[in-house]
Amino acid sequence: MLSVVISAVTLTGLSLVPASAWDAMRPATCLPTACFCEAPLLTESIRQPVNAVSSLAYVLSGAWILVTAGQIAAGVLFGVGHRIIMGLSAIVIGVGSTYYHGSLTFAGQFFDILGMYLFAALLLIYALQRLYRWSFTTTALVYIAFNVTLTLVQIGVPDTRRYVFGIVLALALLAEAVVWRVLRPIRTYAWFWAGIGVFAVAMVVWALDLSAALCDPSSLIQGHAIWHVLGAVAVFCTWKWHASEPAP
């Protein structure tokens, strides 16, 4: 129900904005030619409807994580606070991506990437918290400072956003490898490998769509939309993997 409400409010809000309002804003850096395969409807309130609607798959994953955050057994190591941040991050990705593809503005692009940074940073900082036994306060401060830094980089050098996200995600995986080697956590690793596999497929589809190697601009089936759905599934798998570890 939460995901339906958020999705409905997001789409309704975008549809009520006149197309001319987007023209008055700073355009996304992908314009005029590289905003993925779907042809932009520059005279409409929602410029890339397929990519915009498919983005809401992240809202579904995020809402599920939020709703179940307090229902997981108290003995699980991945705390309620971590779960809430993960759920909210996924929702920010979904709403931000919908705004981005709906408006094709720099502001939309900012919020789209912001959610991705929030999510990837959580994976990295959570692993570091465990390795260095940080307190909640220290972890929260590091997480906030790290995301502020990423935000400043995105504003100052927006064309590096994808590379920065990839670096943070790679660091998170490296940190998790160290966690596994040092702490030997008990987790359901089937969820981890499922998430990695789904994300790998999503990346291939994303690249094919961006390069126009597999592209029909007017189709209702868009590679970037498939990327959104698979990405949301990867988020859910990541959540299940973290939530499977009992507290020591």
Image (spheres, rainbow, N blue to C red):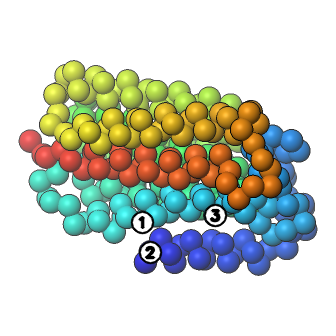
Q: Nearer the viewer, mark 2 or mark 3?
A: 3
- Describe the element under mark 3 as helix, strand or loop: helix
Residue sitting farthest toward the left: 248
Residue 34 x %, y %: 81, 40
Occupied quadrant, residue 218: bottom right
Q: Amino acid at mark 3?
A: Val
Q: Is residue 240 left or right of residue 155?
A: left
User: In the displayed structure, would residue 65 be above or below residue 1?
Assistant: above
Of callouts 2 and 3, the N-terminal one: 2
How many angstroms separate mark 2 from mark 3 (CA)? Answer: 16 Å
- Describe the element under mark 1 as helix, strand or loop: helix
Residue at label 3? 53
Residue at label 1? 63
Density class for disc 3 (Cα within 10 Å; few <14, some 14-19, many ≥20) is many
For residue 22, which numbered disc appears in the image? none
Of callouts 3 and 1, the N-terminal one: 3
Residue at label 2? 2
